[in-house]
Image (tube, rainbow, N blue to C red):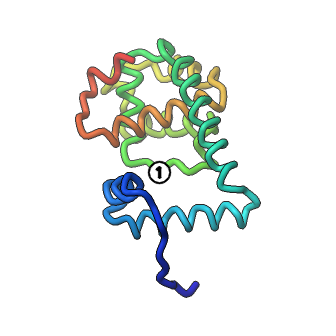
Amino acid sequence: MTNKTTSARISLEEEKFLAENFKTAATGLGQASNIIYQANKNGTSPDKIVENLSSLNQIRLYSQREIKGIFSENEWKYLADSLNGTIITDNFRCVKAGLIAGVEDSDSFDNLSEKWDVNIKDFCDKIQKLTAAQIDAVYTRVEQFWNSENRDLDGWAKC
């Protein structure tokens, strides 16, 4: 694809937002344009993007509430440890078998059940009972932990 420079009229508030989040307003506009272009190629309008993001956010909020109290503090620590550095793709993030396999691999290769004093069978049984949206909520919560600037594992694990 050949690039072209163009100009756009945006409010000062929008320019400030883009500069704060994308280094420059031009970079932010370029990324926004690319998102709209890719969505349009897939048959999705800009309004539908916003609607879908709002729906996803609501599903994640509800799912986050649903998983509260399911896992012990040590099981959350196990998940954070196990998933550290793992890239979770859109096609993978709702698959409970994938999360269970990752948990089991972490035990086999890194002995995390001993490190975190977790019964691996009971832990995997809990994961098995989760819905796809709740699996996503687990991944999202762990990603939020690793992406935060102030990581307090003990405080975070007390969900």
Quarter location, residue 107: top left
Quarter location, residue 56: top right
Which residue is at 42% across, 57% downward? Answer: 11
Q: Residue furthest right?
A: 43
Residue 34: image location, x then y, percent: 56, 67
Q: Residue furthest bottom?
A: 2
Is residue 144 visible in the rendered image? The answer is yes
Whether residue 38 is situated above or below residue 115 in the rendered picture = below
Which residue is at 37% across, 57% downward? Answer: 12
Q: Is residue 124 left or right of residue 150?
A: right
Which residue is at 30% across, 39% downward? Answer: 148
Residue 146: image location, x then y, percent: 34, 40
Residue 123: image location, x then y, percent: 50, 21
Q: Nearer the viewer, residue 125 or 59?
A: 59
Whether residue 65 is situated above or below residue 14 in the rendered picture = above
Q: Nearer the viewer, residue 158 or 14?
A: 14
Q: Is residue 72 left or right of residue 36?
A: left
Q: Secondary structure at mark 1?
A: loop
Give the residue number, with chain letter if any, for mark 1: 87
Number of marks in the rendered image: 1
What is the three-letter code of the residue carrying label 1? Ile
Image quarter in which the N terminus is found: bottom right
Q: Residues within 10 Å of mark 1 (few under 14, many from 20)?
A: few
Which residue is at 23% across, 35% downward? Answer: 150
Residue 124: image location, x then y, percent: 55, 24
Q: Nearer the viewer, residue 106 or 75?
A: 75
Image quarter in which the C terminus is found: top left
Quarter location, residue 19: bottom left
Is residue 97 visible in the rendered image? The answer is no
Whether residue 2 is situated above or below residue 13 in the rendered picture = below
